[in-house]
Image: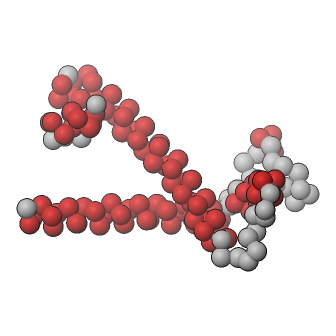
Amino acid sequence: MEAMIGQMLQKSAVKAFAHIKPFLWGIGAYITWGAFLVVGYYNIIMAWSLEYLFYSFYSPLPWGTTSSEANNFFFDNILGMTQDNGEPWSLHMGVGSINWHLMLATLAQWLLVFFCIYNLTNTVQKVVLVT
């Protein structure tokens, strides 16, 4: 609905809903915030995918052949959610240290999204110029 209204009014979600009724700007802000949360969540999943892409060049594959080995690999190597003694992480232990390889993968994913949006903007400008 917000895409249709934004397309019709040629405004962002916040401005489009505020154009309909000034007190409706909050709906547009809520929609924008929700979209940002979804993009952030999907970027974390894509960072996991980048990690798996990196590990896929190892021979044999480090996540093994069974689902329990794959589960252990995900929690141990990707998320880093096990202690030094092999016990699984629990909430009462606290947040823990920063998982640097996952942070770098997340940063790479955000940079990839930024450059895709940046290049798409330039590409659309060239198409509009021609048409």
Instruction: Decide which of 103, 131 is in the foreground and name it.
Output: 131
Q: Position of residue 72 (x, y in %)?
A: 80, 56
Residue at the front extreme, as displayed: 65
Image height of 123 relative to 70, above or below = below
110 left or right of 105? left
127 left or right of 70? left
Q: Is residue 129 visible?
A: yes
Residue at the right extreme, as displayed: 85
Q: Is residue 15 visible?
A: no
Which quadrant would residue 46 be assigned to in this image?
A: bottom right
115 left or right of 40? left
Instruction: Decide which of 30, 71 is in the foreground and name it.
Output: 71
- Image quarter (top left, top right, bottom left or bottom right) of the C terminus: bottom left
Q: Position of residue 81 (x, y in %)?
A: 76, 53
Instruction: Decide which of 15, 7 is in the foreground and name it.
Output: 7
Image height of 94 relative to 71, above or below = above
Q: Position of residue 97 (x, y in %)?
A: 72, 57
- Image quarter (top left, top right, bottom left or bottom right) of the N terminus: top left
Which quadrant would residue 101 be assigned to in this image?
A: bottom right
Residue at 14% over, 36% down:
9
Residue at 36% over, 66% down:
115
